[in-house]
Image (cartoon, rainbow, N blue to C red):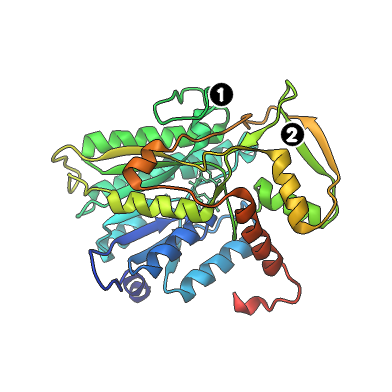
């Protein structure tokens, strides 16, 4: 176990100062892509994931296999396990933590609020606690969400906008995570950077999200339900391609300054940042269905119904000027190009002819 941890976090970088990163939620959608990108450029990476059953466990296991083949070891464990985290920090001097583990999903939260409190609040606080006592203290980059803008109707959303009206329990837990991160920053000198992701999609994407669900149902010839807002307007999302999100995450890690405390004691002003990572071009969900219809070459039967009250907001739209300025973040993949890549992966992954051993 320790050998695999040490090997996974070994650097292979010809120049510069490579990072040593603990990626939480590494077998998740974003976690897999970020871990691969870090490893490919020569950084040391260790993953941790509890492989929960929120969605297809086979997809998570397969992502972990892909990571393992690339030299990234994913420890099976929960971020609430303080002994496990301490052990990992004892074995490896992590320079950075990329915190992506979370109970995601807006609608599931209405029925299972406690699993959100467990992973998104208690788990995150546990990780901050262990990080604050580690020597050296790692810089923390963590995933927040566009959902913190809640019922704010002023678009595009900018980081200075109000976030005091979460529309879902999921959003409330992501907002709570931001507050805890901020507090660990000013009390203990932890360097923290929050990234508010806007509807991420792409290969290896999440089976509970619209892009995946629509693709699956369209291929089965099922009718697609598209929500419109109660006043008849369209529901829009700022869909952001995973490749662009990865660049934003790497930008945040590369510009993260060292924490200023150590062993739980604050030494000076540590870095505190928050950024939107979106695409800046919101698209009606009906248009997403049109593009999938074209790419899948299937005539889609659709039913348009008013949006139920389930925690979803009517629109999201990112203002990304701060991330552009400070992280060099610039999304380059438009929805049709990104969906093409997703569809190619989806058909390949689900092909009955595919020998699953190749993954
Ligand atoms: P995901 O569900 O695919 O990945 C999260 C991973 O974390 C999963 O593999 C899960 O097993 C693991 N996990 C959950 N609780 C854990 C715990 N207590 N201990 C250890 N592992 C745990 O989700 P994702 O889409 O990759 O999202 C990554 C992050 O980005 C999350 O924080 C999510 O809230 C945030 N986010 C995602 C989106 C999006 O559109 N995908 C949008 C906004 C914010």
Task: Say which quadrant the C terminus sits in.
Answer: bottom right
Rendered view: 309 above or below 111: above
Residue at the farthest left position: 267
Q: Helix, strand or loop at disc 1?
A: loop
Q: Helix, strand or loop at disc 2?
A: strand
Name which quarter of the figure residue 313 lies in. top right
Give coordinates of residue 68: x percent, y percent.
Answer: 47, 73
Determine whether label 2 and label 1 are within 8 Å by CB. no
Give coordinates of residue 240: x percent, y percent.
Answer: 54, 47
Q: Foreground: 150 or 52?
A: 150
Residue 245 seen anywhere in this rendered image of the structure: yes
Q: Which mark is residue 101?
A: none
Q: Which mark is residue 227?
A: 2
Give coordinates of residue 340: x percent, y percent.
Answer: 65, 58
Q: Foreground: 150 or 123?
A: 150
Total count of labels: 2
């Amino acid at each position: 176990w320790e050998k695999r941890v040490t090997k996974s976090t070994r650097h292979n970088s010809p120049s510069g100062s490579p990072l040593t990163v603990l990626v939480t939620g590494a077998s998740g959608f974003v976690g897999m892509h970020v871990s691969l990108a870090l490893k490919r450029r020569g950084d040391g990476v260790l993953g941790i994931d509890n492989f929960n059953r929120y969605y297809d466990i086979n997809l998570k296991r397969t992502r972990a296999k892909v990571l393992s083949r690339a030299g990234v070891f994913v420890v099976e464990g929960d971020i609430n396990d303080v002994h496990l985290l301490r052990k990992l920090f004892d074995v490896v001097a992590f320079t950075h933590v990329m915190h992506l583990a979370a109970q995601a999903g807006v609608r599931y939260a209405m029925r299972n609020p406690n699993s959100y409190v467990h992973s998104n609040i208690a788990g995150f606080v546990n990780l901050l606690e262990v990080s604050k006592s580690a020597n050296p203290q790692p810089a923390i980059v963590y995933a927040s969400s566009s959902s913190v803008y809640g019922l704010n109707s002023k678009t595009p959303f900018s980081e200075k906008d109000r976030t005091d009206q979460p529309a879902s329990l999921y959003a409330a837990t992501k907002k709570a995570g931001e507050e805890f991160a901020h507090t660990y920053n000013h009390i203990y000198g932890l360097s923290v950077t929050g990234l508010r992701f806007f509807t991420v999609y792409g290969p290896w994407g999440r089976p509970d999200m619209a892009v995946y669900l629509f693709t699956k149902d369209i291929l089965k010839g099922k009718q697609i339900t598209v929500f419109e807002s109660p006043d008849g307007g369209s529901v829009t999302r700022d869909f952001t391609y995973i490749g662009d999100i990865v660049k934003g995450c790497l930008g945040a890690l590369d510009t993260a300054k060292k924490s200023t405390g150590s062993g739980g004691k604050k030494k000076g002003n540590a870095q505190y940042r928050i950024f939107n990572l979106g695409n800046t071009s919101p698209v009606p969900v009906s248009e997403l269905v049109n593009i999938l219809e074209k790419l899948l070459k299937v005539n889609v039967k659709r039913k348009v119904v008013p949006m139920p009250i389930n925690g979803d907001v009517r629109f999201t739209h990112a203002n990304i000027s701060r991330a552009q300025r400070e992280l060099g973040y610039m999304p380059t993949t438009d929805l049709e190009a990104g969906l093409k890549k997703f569809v190619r992966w989806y058909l390949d992954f689900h092909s009955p002819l595919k020998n699953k051993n190749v993954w």
